[in-house]
Every structure is written in C-alpha cells, then in structure tokens.
Image (cartoon, rainbow, N blue to C red):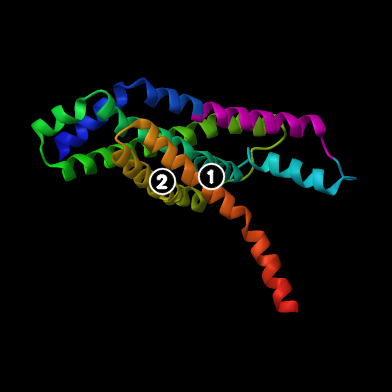
C-alpha cells in the first residue's frame, strides 16, 4: 500500500495540472485579499452608510488576526470543491486517456488498493494545498493588515484551533472527491468526472438558494 501511495504521489507531483490548479487557487486568494483591502482603504470610514460601513469592517477583519484564518478556511471551502472536482477527475480520468491504468493493474492487480491509494494521495495533495493557502494568507494578510492600521490580536488558544479547523475543512471536501471519482470511473473519462462533479455543485448551490424561501413559506404557513 505504501508503494502504491508513493507511486500516486509521484505521478501527481509530475503532472502540470497539479501545479496549475494550485497556482490558480492561491492566486485567487491573493487577488481577493488585495482587492478587498484596497477597497477598504480607498473608501475609508463611512459612518453615514451603515451597510457599506459593515462591509468595509468585514474586509478589514479578513486580513487581521484571527479573522485572517477564517478567510483562509472560507476560501478553501468555497472554491475548494470546484478545484477538487477538476483535480480528481484529471488524476483519475488520465489513467484511462493515457492508458496507464492497465499497466498499473498488471503490476498491482488489486483494484481496491489502487483506488484507495489514489484517493489517499489526492487527499494528501488537498491537505498540502490547504497548508500552502494558510502560509500564503499569513504572508499576504499580515502586511496588508499592517498597512491599514493593525494586524489584530492572536492568542495561543487560536493557534491550537488551527490544525483541527484545517482538518475539518479538508474533510468537508472528501464527499466531492468521492463523487467525482465515481463519475469518472463510470464514464471512464475526465469529462465524465468533471461534468458529474460540477453538475452536483451547481445543483447543490441551486437547492441552497431555496432554503430562505422554505423558511418564508414555513413562517407564512405557521402564521395562517
């Protein structure tokens, strides 16, 4: 199993898709942090506009401690699912398009062990991306926070919560990974995995928008 996991990790580290997706994922975080901080600095204090003042305070909080950690985790959970779908479909689907699956199973015919090694390697890659995002968030966020006045406050209790919070954020992405792998295996192609995974994300987002309507409908029914 260790040899299979090592082989999968080596394949992922040598494929350009891994580094391209990581670069895009981290770049989007940088763009978001810089643009929101710049807007907060340009707009300044707006005591006459309550809604805008709250939004500016939220932008400032996202680059200050401990809110910076929340911004990193939010970036991982909001955009991470889409990146996981593309990454998992690419890693699993390429086994069919490149013809490496047959050669792999010829050496290690146990399909279950191969699939488990693939999933574990992808989860390790996602964990590494989460750590990169955290380090980049600190390197980018703290100078931005200092530029607008204060880096915030940080306690030892906050530090102890970071590993568990990162593990929880990575674990939340596991169902999307498994779903994408399943669609890729069924369709035996990258396109099938991407279409199935992103299709589910779109469906999930659409159903999520109906939740407020359900509350309104429930309140109306109760009131009648």
**Foreground of the two, 175 or 39:** 175
Say which of marks 2 and 1 sits in front: 1
Q: Is residue 180 magenta?
A: no
Q: Position of residue 43 (x, y in %)?
A: 81, 33
**Foreground of the two, 220 or 107:** 220
- The magenta region covers 25-45
User: Which residue lies at the image location 90% right of the left edge and 45% below the top edge?
Assistant: 48
- Tell me the residue that label 1 is attached to: 202
As helix, strand or loop, the secondary structure at mark 2 comes to helix
Q: In the rendered structure, find residue 176 and report the number of the disc placed on it.
A: 2
Residue 178 relative to residue 135: left or right? left
Q: Residues within 10 Å of mark 2 (few under 14, many from 20)?
A: many
- Name the residue at the front extreme: 187
Labels in figure, total: 2
Residue 75 relative to residue 145: left or right? left
Q: Position of residue 55 (x, y in %)?
A: 75, 44
Q: In the rendered structure, find residue 222 and report the number of the disc placed on it.
A: none
As helix, strand or loop, the secondary structure at mark 1 comes to helix
């Amino acid at each position: 199993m260790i040899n299979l996991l090592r082989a999968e990790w080596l394949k992922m580290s040598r494929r350009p898709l891994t580094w391209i997706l990581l670069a895009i994922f981290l770049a989007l975080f940088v763009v978001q942090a810089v643009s929101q901080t710049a807007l907060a600095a340009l707009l300044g204090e707006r005591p006459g506009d309550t809604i805008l003042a709250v939004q500016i305070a939220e932008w400032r909080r996202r680059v200050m401690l401990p809110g910076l950690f929340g911004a990193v985790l939010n970036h991982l959970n909001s955009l991470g699912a889409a990146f996981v779908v593309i990454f998992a479909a690419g890693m699993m689907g390429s086994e069919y398009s490149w013809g490496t699956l047959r050669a792999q199973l010829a050496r290690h015919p146990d399909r279950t062990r191969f699939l488990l090694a693939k999933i574990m390697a992808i989860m390790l890659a996602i964990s590494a991306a989460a750590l990169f995002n955290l380090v980049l968030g600190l390197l980018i966020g703290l100078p931005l926070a200092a530029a607008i006045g204060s880096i915030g406050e940080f306690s030892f209790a906050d530090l102890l919560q970071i590993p568990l919070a990162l593990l929880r954020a990575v674990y939340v992405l596991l169902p999307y990974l498994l779903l994408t792998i399943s669609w890729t295996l069924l369709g035996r192609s990258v396109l099938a995995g991407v279409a199935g995974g992103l299709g589910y994300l779109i469906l999930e987002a659409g159903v999520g928008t109906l939740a407020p309507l359900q509350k309104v409908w429930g309140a109306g029914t109760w009131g009648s």
